[in-house]
Image (cartoon, rainbow, N blue to C red):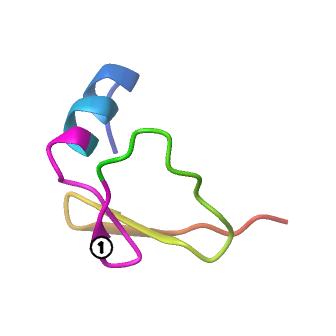
Amino acid sequence: MAESGGEAKAVISEGQVLVNGKVETRKRKQIVSGDIVEFRNEKIRVQLT
């Protein structure tokens, strides 16, 4: 994962983050339960309880 908020904003704007298999460049994209976020060869499935 990103080391800081600044790094997160940079990698998102550079197109390095995928949400549900698609490049996501919106910094304020709402992530919902069931979404899969990919960054640096790591996948995380979001589950809200």
Check disc 1 and report its element: helix, strand or loop: strand
Residue 14, quarter of the rendered image:
top left
Q: Give percent across and percent down for residue 47.
A: 69, 69
* Residue drawn 85% across the image and 66% down it: 49
Residue 1 in the magenta stretch? The answer is: no
Please state the horizontal and vertical placement of residue 4, each as a whole percent of the image.
36, 24
How many badges with numbers are in the image? 1
* Outermost residue to the left: 14
What residue appears at the point 32 percent right and 37 percent down from the top-left corner? Answer: 2
Q: Which residues are magenta?
A: 13-24
Residue that lies at the very extreme toward the front in this rendered image: 26
Q: Specify the quadrant that holds the N terminus.
A: top left
The residue that mark 1 highlights is 22
Q: Nearer the viewer, residue 2 or 28?
A: 28
x and y, in percent, of residue 7 in the image: 26, 28
In this view, which residue lies farthest toward the right? 49
**Side (left or right) of 46 relative to 24:** right
**In the image, is residue 15 above or below residue 43?**
above
What type is the residue that disc 1 sits on? Lys
31 over 6 or under it: above or below? below
Residue 19 in magenta stretch: yes
Query: Closest to the observer: 6 or 41?
Result: 6
Q: Residues within 10 Å of mark 1 (few under 14, many from 20)?
A: few
**Residue nearest the viewer, comparing 19 with 45:** 19
Placement of 37 over or under 10, stated as above or below: below
Q: Is residue 30 left or right of residue 11?
A: right
Query: Quadrant of the rendered structure where residue 5 is?
Result: top left
